[in-house]
Amino acid sequence: MKSFQTERWIVDKSEQSLIDHPQVIQASLWIKQDEVVALPTETVYGLAGNAGSDYAIARIFEAKGRPSDNPLIVHISDRKQLEGLVSSIPKSAEDLMNKFWPGPLTIVLPKGTKVSEKVTAGLSTVAVRMPNHPVALAVIEASGVPLAAPSANLSGKPSPTTANHVYEDLKGRIPGIVDGGSTGVGVESTVVECTDNGEITILRPGGVTFEELENVVGLGKVMVDPGIDDEKLAPRSPGVKYTHYAPNAPFVLVDGSPEFLQQLVDKERAAGRRVGILTTEERIGLYRADSVIPSGVRSNPETVAQHLYEALRSFNEANVDQIFGEVFPKTGVGAAIMNRLEKSAGGNVIKE
Ligand code: AMP
Ligand code: MG
């Protein structure tokens, strides 16, 4: 593995003409040399490299320790960059781009000639999105090429929502991190595939909700890949099958009342184990444990998504032996929240 003195390049996202910002140029110079750098997007921090370079893509997989059969999302700053990246664009995909780009929606399209085989893990399709973050857009533009960018964490760990999280995981493995502050959405993009008949299928739930997609595509025209939740089916998005977002201690979801959850905690603590609880601001006062960590406000699910990975990471510092977490309704962004929590818990749910 190559080693680096990982630099931190601070960029204030509200500044004008970011494309001329010295730190943005610094990051783009590394990308032009086929190296990889971390950058903020509106979802989570990404680890970015030239999507047309086999070497850069190999570096992304190496730095993250990512399984090579898990394809990457390619990020663009301008729709002109779709040329060569994809071979065709169905009408339904164009409607989605018009409505949701720049934003947390990734569209799977037939692959073009200018994309490394390593990006798509040998698939005939490529996943593309335009991020809604001025710093990400500036780095892509300054680099002059589409950038492949998975989340900038070690494979299997919770995704990074601050530059510090990236540093914890990738220190010494990459030349630098563009630090643009905390990300906004907090969970990754929604991945969709379009069919010719105007229907779309969600391959991974994320920042754009089922309901928002249905408003654009039409009632009854949004499907959800059954492989996302059914262990026995192969998901159409290869990454969905991997364990993800896991804190160091075993994590179990509890589908029941706070009283029931507390009983589980008490039992563990009586056996001498340190226990953490993942909850929300409203419920902190209901629990007694060694570490009670809220992820946002339950009545505002967007805030739960925003703080989810940070909360999961903070159990590592709390040195707990076991974590119990609350569940959320699977509507709106709740579908993405529960998808990440279920992955994080390796599917372990205790029902009251
Ligand atoms: P990450 O960048 O870590 O958020 O993960 C990217 C997600 O997009 C993974 O679940 C991938 O499997 C998925 N993905 C990337 N390219 C494709 C593709 N061509 N077809 C289906 N899913 C894809
Ligand atoms: Mg990831």
Image: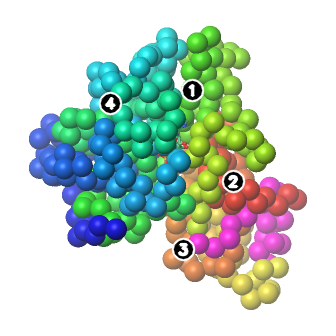
Q: Distance between the residues labelled 3 and 1?
A: 36 Å
Which residue is denoted by mark 3 in the rendering? 316
* Residue 56 position in % (x across, y down): 31, 49
Residue at image location 32% in from the left, 30% down from the top: 114
Q: Distance between the residues labelled 3 and 4?
A: 41 Å
Q: Nearer the viewer, mark 1 or mark 2?
A: 1
Residue at image location 73% in from the left, 35% down from the top: 226
Q: Which of marks 3 and 2 is nearer the N terminus?
A: 3
In screen coordinates, is 32 left or right of 235? left
The segment highlighted magenta reads 248-266
* Residue 316 position in % (x across, y down): 54, 74
Disc 1 residue type (three-letter): Glu
Disc 3 residue type (three-letter): Asn
Which residue is denoted by mark 1 in the rendering? 193
Tag 3 near tag 2, CB within 8 Å: no
* Residue 122 position in % (x across, y down): 49, 38
